[in-house]
Structure formats: structure tokens, C-alpha cells
């Protein structure tokens, strides 16, 4: 990765843990030796955002795993960026494949959420990625470019956006993309940003990889020129998350 882009590692706890187990994980993280040249963000379940923010060391940021597209109102079950900020939380994950494919969230809704979260001052980890049948049909580029466009159309300030490429077939499957497979898509995404946004944004935006990243696979992935970090699910709940944070060392 380019030295101008700070390495970024997100842990996506998904709908896992309780105060006891997350508290233990947080204790492990707080006492670990982590290098300061990496941004670390933990995405906690909504109900534990406050808990996570209060317990995690200030050097770690916290993210919500989703939010709605407006500030408040009659939207039962939803949370807003304003509420997220009220808990001292500074990031939100949007467009995660589970939101798209389990809960049916569209490109359009994802874009609207990105616009609102950014307008409220949150950082956004915006996720994109193709499904296995799409990869096999040779339309990976088409899919990820369309998803990226729906996000990019809603971004004014790219300094608050991290793009997470997460091939759906690699998420939670133990089947990590090879470093070359990931690098190949990351380069294309950077080229897309160059031709559709600007050269500057293409150079400075972190493009992170997600999908079964482990302590064992992270170093080789991190050595690729266009992989600027990770979004980690399963392994972010284990002590090996520290090795992933320190993948560049
Ligand atoms: P995984 O999840 O590391 O468990 O594959 C990644 C993600 O969904 O962000």
C-alpha cells in the first residue's frame, strides 16, 4: 500500500457476543501492543455501542454496523447517525453484504444512508462485493462498479470514506480471496475512482479487503500495493485480531 494511506483495520463483531465476552475482548485489545500507524475501528452491535465506546481505549474508534438515512422519526427499530454520535461513536459500516443480501437493502438506499451519515459527520466504511455466481459469470467488475457508483454519487468529502471490497463468497466461508484476486479488484476500483471522481481521491482513499481474513492470511494480503487494510468478521472476536491490526509489522 502507499505510505500516503494510513493502514485501516475494522473489526465487524456482527450480531455476536455479550457484555461478558465483548468486555473480555476489549480488555485483550486495550492491553495489547498495537502499532500507532494503523487506524483501528470496532463495529459493535447497536445495543452495545455505548458499552464498547466506554470500555475501549481511546486509541480505538467504534463504528455502528448500520444506520438509517434520516435524523429521527417514526422508524421503529432503526438508529440514526445523530444517536450514534451521541454515544461518542464516530464511524458507521454501510452497505455490508448481509444488509444487502439478508435484509434486501438496495444500492439506492445504501447511497442515501451514505449521504446522510457523511452530512452528520460520521466516517463511513462503505462495503461492496460480488456474489459467487456473479464472479463466475464474469461480471465482478460490473457489479462492484455499480455499487461504487451508488456510493460515490453521494460523497462530497472522500476523506471520511473507506471503501471495503468484500467478495460475498469469501465472507464467513473460510475462503479468503487470494492476495492477487483481491489486488486485481482493488486496482480496478482505484482506477474507477480516478476516472469517475479524481486522481487525488483515487490516490488517497483507503480500499480495504474483507472476507475470511485471519492472522494467517493478513500479512500477504497486506503486502499488496492497493490493499490498505481489512474489514474482519470472525477473527475480530479473537485475540488474533491483534495480529491483523499489526499485519504491516
Ligand atoms: P469474515 O467477515 O471475516 O467473518 O469473513 C467479514 C465481514 O463480513 O466484514
Image (spheres, helix red, strand yellow):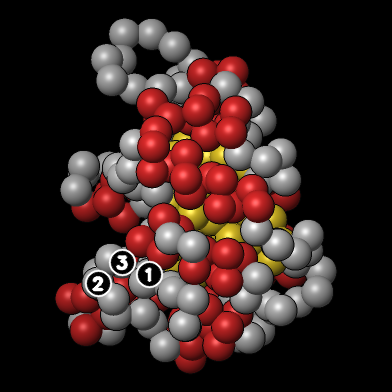
Indicate if the residue with disc 1 has its beta carbon within 8 Å of ligand 1: yes
Q: Residue at x 44, y 11 (%)?
A: 72
Q: Which mark is residue 173?
A: 2
Q: Residue furthest bottom?
A: 180
Indicate if the residue with disc 3 has its beta carbon within 8 Å of ligand 1: yes
Q: Residue 171 carries which label?
A: 3
Quarter of the image where ligand 1 sits: bottom left
Number of other residues with Cα within 10 Å of mark 3, as a class: few under 14, some 14 to 19, many 20 or more = many
Label pair 3/1, CB-CB below 8 angstroms: yes
Q: Residue 211 carries which label?
A: 1
Number of other residues with Cα within 10 Å of mark 2, as a class: few under 14, some 14 to 19, many 20 or more = few
Q: Distance between the residues labelled 1 and 2?
A: 8 Å
Residue 178: give x, y in percent of width and height.
42, 88
Seen from the viewer's position, the closer of residues 141 and 47 is 47
Residue 193: give x, y in percent of width and height.
61, 66
Q: Can residue 234 be seen in this view?
A: yes
Q: Which residue is drawn at 43% across and 42% down?
A: 22
Q: How far apart are marks 3 and 1 (CA)?
A: 4 Å
Amino acid at each position: 500500500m502507499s505510505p500516503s494511506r494510513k493502514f485501516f483495520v475494522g473489526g465487524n463483531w456482527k450480531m455476536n457476543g455479550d457484555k461478558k465476552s465483548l468486555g473480555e475482548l476489549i480488555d485483550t485489545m486495550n492491553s495489547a501492543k498495537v502499532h500507532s500507524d494503523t487506524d483501528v475501528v470496532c463495529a459493535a452491535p447497536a445495543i452495545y455501542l455505548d458499552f464498547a465506546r466506554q470500555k475501549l481505549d481511546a486509541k480505538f474508534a467504534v463504528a455502528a454496523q448500520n444506520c438509517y438515512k434520516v435524523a429521527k422519526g417514526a422508524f421503529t427499530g432503526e438508529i440514526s447517525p445523530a444517536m450514534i454520535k451521541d454515544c461518542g461513536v464516530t464511524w458507521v459500516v454501510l452497505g455490508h453484504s448481509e444488509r444487502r443480501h439478508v435484509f434486501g437493502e438496495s444500492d439506492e438506499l445504501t447511497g442515501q444512508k451514505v449521504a446522510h451519515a457523511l452530512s452528520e459527520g460520521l466516517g463511513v466504511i462503505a462495503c461492496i462485493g460480488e456474489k459467487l455466481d456473479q464472479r463466475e459469470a464474469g461480471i465482478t467488475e460490473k457489479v462492484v462498479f455499480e455499487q461504487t457508483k451508488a456510493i460515490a454519487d453521494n460523497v462530497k468529502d472522500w476523506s471520511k470514506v473507506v471503501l471495503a471490497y468484500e467478495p460475498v463468497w469469501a465472507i464467513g466461508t473460510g475462503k479468503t480471496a487470494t492476495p492477487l484476486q483481491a489486488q486485481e479488484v482493488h486496482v480496478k476500483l482505484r482506477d474507477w475512482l480516478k476516472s469517475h471522481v479524481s486522481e487525488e481521491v483515487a490516490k488517497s482513499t483507503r480500499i480495504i479487503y474483507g472476507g475470511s481474513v485471519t492472522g494467517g492470511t493478513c500479512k500477504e494480503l497486506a503486502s499488496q500495493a492497493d490493499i490498505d487494510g481489512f474489514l474482519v468478521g470472525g477473527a475480530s472476536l479473537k485475540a488474533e485480531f491483534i495480529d491483523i491490526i499489526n499485519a504491516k509489522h
